Image: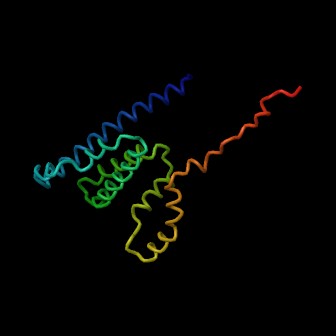
Amino acid sequence: MNYSSYLLASWLCVMLGYSQATIGEDLRTLMEYFQNESTSSDISDNGTLFLNMMDRWKEDGDKKILMSQIVTVYFKIFEIFKNNTIIKKSVENIKEDMIMKFFTNNTASKVNDFEAVINTQVNDLRVQKKAIFELALIMNDLSSKPHLRRRKRRQNRKQGEIKQ
């Protein structure tokens, strides 16, 4: 490795460490804000919101589906508090960190698509019509068709034999 690579690697380590420290502070800020807004019994009523679900969903694909729904809920919560001057910066930082962690190949178009799906107005008749007309294609994508995707090769018995 050359000098610039070492410098870049060092800078990246410092930034990641700083980022995690900042996120920790932002999480504390949010927890303190909500502790002041309610009593602790509100939080413990009826068990956890998401943690028990996360324990039940073990497979990576399944867990990714559940996580996308949980991230959606957090984005909706963050949207509610986007104008709150006390926690606005913390909410923005945490949302940005969630985006970087959830969208590992962090392309802006994927984030925009995700947010567009979240913000879809399902009570709009035009949206309902479009969704129904796209339903067959969506259902087709949802169904797994491994038997159609794989082609079995038939081997000719004579193919392996050497002609003399």
Residue sitting at the far top: 1
Position of the C terminus by quadrant = top right
In the displayed structure image, the side of residue 96 where residue 153 appears, left or right: right
The answer to which image quadrant residue 153 occupies is top right
Q: Give 27 or 118, whichever is nearer the viewer.
A: 118
- Towards the viewer: 137 or 3: 137
State left or right for residue 114 relative to residue 92.
Answer: right
Quadrant that contains the N terminus: top right
Viewed as shown, does residue 95 lie left or right of 41?
right
Rendering coords of residue 52 (x, y %): 25, 45
Q: Position of residue 12 (x, y in %)?
A: 44, 33
- Left or right: 56 with respect to 137? left
Count of labels in the image: 0
Q: Position of residue 65 (x, y in %)?
A: 40, 50
Vertical order, 85 against 157 (above or below)? below
Residue sitting nearer the eye, 76 or 164:
164
Please tell me which residue is depicted at 40% across the width and 46% down the height of the picture: 62
Say which residue appears at 35% left-offset and 51% top-offset: 71
Q: Residue at 12% across / 54% down in the picture?
A: 38
Outermost residue on the bottom side: it is: 125
